Amino acid sequence: MLYGGSKEAAASVSKDAEVMLKLGSTPDKREQYRLMRDAMEKRFIRVTRGSIVGGIRLGMFTAGFYGLQNLLAEKRGVHDVFNVVGAGSATAAAFVPGSLQWRARNVVLGSVLGAAICFPLGWIHLKLVEKANEGNMAAKSSGEIGEAKSGLGAAIDRLEENLNK
């Protein structure tokens, strides 16, 4: 939403210059006030619309990415980096802007960019999840009796232990 709103706000600077030119050519104060009010209302509507559209686009992209990632993990039965790469490639290819002919031409580019960006991110995510789950495995294997901790709780405990040393 911030991206869409800031993009529209930056684009409205040239339109504000047009309003200032009109203000300078109008000696009537009421007409100047009306022009300024109309310009501010239009700018507010443009920025609001840009924020909403930007939020919807990001939400659709994120929902598509995570939906495909979970679908691939479910169908393959494995949670690994290639689920992230496949989901990133498919969503990048699907969200390439332009006409249908332009999209068909750029599907390969979107797939390559999606895979290139998502492979390292997926690998980092996988390693962080494994690191967070180490505490749970150690607690279960040592036979500790007590409350089972989530991966995040175990990671926080390990961090506290390292800071106290």
Image (cartoon, rainbow, N blue to C red):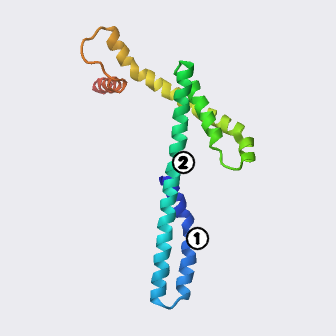
Sooner in the amino-acid sequence: mark 2 or mark 1: 1
Residue at 55% across, 36% down: 65
Which image quadrant for residue 135?
Answer: top left
Tag 1: amino acid: Ser
Residue 96, percent from left and from top: 65, 44
Instruction: Give the secondary structure at mark 2.
Output: helix
Left or right of 159 in this view: 86: right
Left or right of 161 in this view: 83: right
Indicate the quadrant containing the C terminus: top left, top right, bottom left or bottom right: top left
* Residue identifier under label 1: 14
Residue 29, percent from left and from top: 45, 88
Residue 57 — which label?
2
Residue at 50% across, 70% down: 42
In this rendered view, identify the residue nearer to me: 116 or 22.
22
Q: Is residue 18 above or below residue 111?
A: below
Can the viewer see residue 133 in this picture?
yes
Say how many tags the image has. 2
